[in-house]
Amino acid sequence: MVVVAAKNFKITKGQDLMKKYSEGGFADRFFCGNCGSPIYTSQPIHPKVLFIKAGSLDDTSQLAPKNHVWCDSAWPWTP
């Protein structure tokens, strides 16, 4: 997941394919209406940021992990 400032986020292609699933005020999840791939999530408690699914990006070469989440329950072979 990549956290970005909402004001800096822009979908450049495929906007007409986007679908939204709302989770009762907790989060809005946006995904591809064709294949169902998750694209990003917005949350009212964090209105200034969006949570982008890294797998949806064309180029992740400039990304590096900064946090590890749920590591205590990770499989021993997980790097």
Image (cartoon, rainbow, N blue to C red):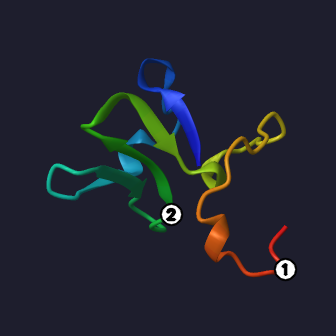
Residue 70 image-quadrant placement: bottom right
Residue 47 is at least partly visible in this image: yes
Question: Does dot 2 land on a helix, a strand or a loop?
Answer: loop
Q: Is 56 above or below relative to 47?
A: below
Residue 34 image-quadrant placement: bottom left
Measure how far apart labels 1 and 2 are at the Cα level. 27 Å
Q: Going 48% across and 42% down the picture, which residue do you hit?
A: 51
**The one of 46 and 21 positioned closer to us in this rendering:** 46
Location of the C terminus by quadrant is bottom right
**The one of 26 and 36 positioned closer to us in this rendering:** 26
Q: Going 27% across and 37% down the picture, which residue do you hit?
A: 45
Q: Going 41% across and 40% down the picture, which residue do you hit?
A: 15
Badge 2 crowding class, 10 Å Cα cut-off, few under 14, some 14 to 19, many 20 or more, is some
Q: Is 52 above or below relative to 76?
A: above
| Coordinates of residue 46 in the picture (x, y in percent) | 33, 33
Q: Is residue 65 left or right of residue 37?
A: right
Residue 72 image-quadrant placement: bottom right
The residue wearing badge 2 is 37
Give the residue at the far top of this rendering.
7
Residue 12 is at least partly visible in this image: no
Which mark, residue 4?
none
Q: Going 23% across and 51% down the picture, which residue do you hit?
A: 26
Question: Does dot 1 land on a helix, a strand or a loop?
Answer: loop
- Marks 1/2 in contact by CB < 8 Å: the verdict is no
Q: Is 51 above or below relative to 19?
A: above
**The one of 11 and 47 positioned closer to us in this rendering:** 47
Give the residue at the far left of this rendering.
24
- Disc tally is 2
| Coordinates of residue 41 in the picture (x, y in percent) | 40, 47
- Mark 2 is on which residue type? Ser
Badge 1 crowding class, 10 Å Cα cut-off, few under 14, some 14 to 19, many 20 or more, is few
Which mark, residue 77?
1
